[in-house]
Image (spheres, grey):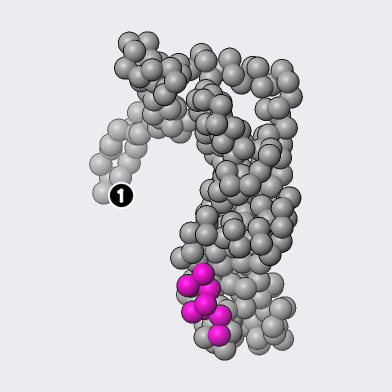
Amino acid sequence: MSTATATRADGEATPQRRSRPGWVLGAVVPVALVGAWWISTAVGAFPPSQLPPPVDVFTAAQQLWATGALQLNIAISVQRVLVGFACGAVAGLVVGGLTGSSVTAYRLLSPTLGALRAVPSLAWVPLLGLWIGLGEPPKITLVAIGAFFPVYTTVLSAMTHLDPALVEVGRAYGRRGLGLFTSVLLPATAPTLLSGLRLGLAQSWLFLVAAELISSSIGLGFQMTNGQNTSRTDQVLLAIILLALLGKATDLVLGVVENRVKASRE
């Protein structure tokens, strides 16, 4: 059989699909958006104060990089996301595992957590400022809140849909409580948990922007606010682009881990 054909289940030869690398198709929309952005500014569809051309944004990046401000803003924002995400993900894993494995804990905690999950991110900002004060703790706490609920919800859902026979087998081997969770339940829910971690990480970036927009003197959210106050739309667009790239980069890392875990289970 030639390399251009493949055999179906019924024996009939069909053309073999040759898929292009995923990044090729994934780059189509960003390239098209940049092209439309450049064309719209070149023909004067928008004034530079509203939509500066791409070269102006690139120039702003060079200027901020030369002063060290851009590297510092990126480093601080990434640090806040990683620390807050780690705290929120661990808390979500613990609470989700507890409520998913205990009927009493589920009835006790689930209604309250379900209500708190609906609270918008900006609503937490003034309360955290009053309780914790200024500085890094309220920002990291807000990011942790953003990471907590997707992880908690995903773990809880995975736990409640586990095969009861799996739990019985674990108990038959003497696993109880934390031992049962870490050695049986957690590995069984690993693929779903990683999906929840990716959702929690995306939510962490959203909550980071809320924290830095309201109360911050450094970071990419502050760069957006400062750009707005000084009429530097190029800096605002630069911060948005960087947040998108950083969010995608961190998601890709977890995506690689998720794919490897799924491949190891097949």
Residue shown at 62% from the left, 73% from the top: 95
Asked if residue 237 lies left or right of residue 62, the reply is: left
Magenta range is 108-116
Magenta includes 110?
A: yes
Residue 237, placed above or below residue 166: above
Residue shown at 66% from the left, 22% from the top: 64
Residue 158 seen:
no
- The x, y position of residue 118, in whole percent, is 46, 65
Residue 45 seen:
yes
- The x, y position of residue 252, in whole percent, is 57, 41
Residue 93, placed above or below residue 136: below
Q: Pick whichever, 229 or 201, lies toward us.
A: 229
Asked if residue 44 lies left or right of residue 248, the reply is: left
Tell me the quarter of the image containing the N terminus.
top left
Residue 20, placed above or below residue 193: above
Q: Pick whichever, 98 or 214, lies toward us.
A: 214
Mark 1: secondary structure: loop
Asked if residue 222 lies left or right of residue 12, the reply is: right
Question: Number of labelled discs?
Answer: 1
Q: Please identify the dominant SS of the magenta region.
A: helix
Residue 99, placed above or below residue 121: below
Magenta includes 240?
A: no
Q: Amino acid at mark 1?
A: Ala
- The x, y position of residue 154, in whole percent, is 52, 65
Residue shown at 66% from the left, 71% from the top: 94
Identify residue for label 1: 9
- The x, y position of residue 122, in whole percent, is 52, 55
